[in-house]
Amino acid sequence: ERLLYDEEYWRRISARGVRAVLRNHTYRHRFHEVLGVLGVDVAFDKPPVVTIILKAGGDQRSCIEMLKNQTIRPQKIIVAGEKEDGEDLLSNLEAAGYNAEAWRRECRINSFQAGDKDSFFAVMNGKDFYGPEYLHDAVDALGYCGTDITTMGNVYLQKGGSVTFSGNPASECMMTDTAVSATVVAKGCVLSSALLEKLLTKRSFKTDIPVYSRYAFEYIQSDSSSMAQSRLREKVCL
């Protein structure tokens, strides 16, 4: 009965169900189990290759802790932003064991476009909160959505000590023509100079290609005030 009247509860149950199916109950999983019973040793899928384009800003300690908690470890982190903030964050990321480098625009775009078809990039804002399953959920969505780029049409907003949802849940799990830059996760082949400029300079923008709006969980757009990550997880993590 609660599923009929509590929209937030329904959205959470739905998102958990999608995650459970994609992680454990696809035809690929069943086929792998059958091969195992037959004694055929076949390696399962390789972990996805994800590069993060990280906009420097906010509390660096919290930002690095958030990255450590991701269930998909990024292959590389590229730091973009003001030179002083970027250099400081870059050295701290390297000290934490990440393969990190400063942004070099054109050569990096070319390497994305020429990369493996299963490579992805994610734009993340160091000021915002990303739950542990953020990257994993986004890469999963790219596997079933039928397009090469995903975003969140609406997001949770943190202002002071409260977290609110920014819009209509009907915008989830459907195509949209608007991308929220800090929630974009896409296949490397779509990155271009024009798209990159929008991702790094605009909070949201209209897109020239179809974009899939996934569930808004695992992300909070934060204001300048601090709020314990444990409280943020309670609000948006599944």
Image (spheres, grey):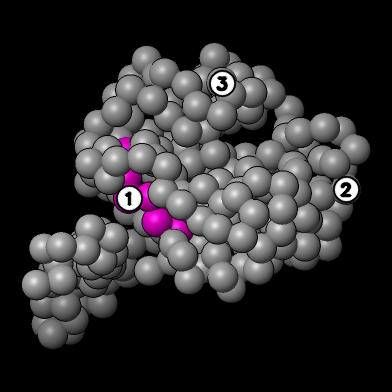
The first of marks 1 and 2 along the sequence is 2
Q: Determine which residue is flagged by label 1.
A: 215
User: Which range is magenta?
Assistant: 213-219
Q: What separation in Å lies between label 3 and label 1 (alpha carbons)?
A: 22 Å
Query: Disc 3 or disc 1, which is closer to the eye?
Result: 1
> Residue at 46% of width from left, 52% of height from top?
164
Q: Nearer the viewer, residue 92 or 12?
A: 12
Res. 124 image quadrant: top right
Q: Is residue 214 magenta?
A: yes
Amino acid type shown at disc 3: Lys
Q: Residues within 10 Å of mark 3 (few under 14, many from 20)?
A: some
Kindly tell me whether residue 215 is visible in this rendering. yes
Which amino acid type is shown beneath numbered disc 2?
Answer: Asp
- Magenta run includes residue 41: no
The relative height of residue 112 versus residue 201 in the rendered view (above or below) is: below
- Which residue appears at 41% of the width and 49% of the height? 165
* Mark 3 residue element: helix
- Please rate how many residues cluster around mark 2, counting C-alpha atoms within 10 Å: few if below 14, some from 14 to 19, many from 20: few
Residue under the image location 88 percent in, 48 percent down: 88
- For disc 2, the marked residue is 88
Q: Could you say whether the residue bearing mark 2 is in a helix, strand or loop?
A: helix
Mark-to-mark CA distance, 2 and 3:
24 Å
Circle 1 SS class: loop
Q: Which mark is residue 198?
A: 3
Q: Choose between 218 and 112: the one closer to the eye.
A: 218
Please provide percent x and percent y for residue 105.
69, 24
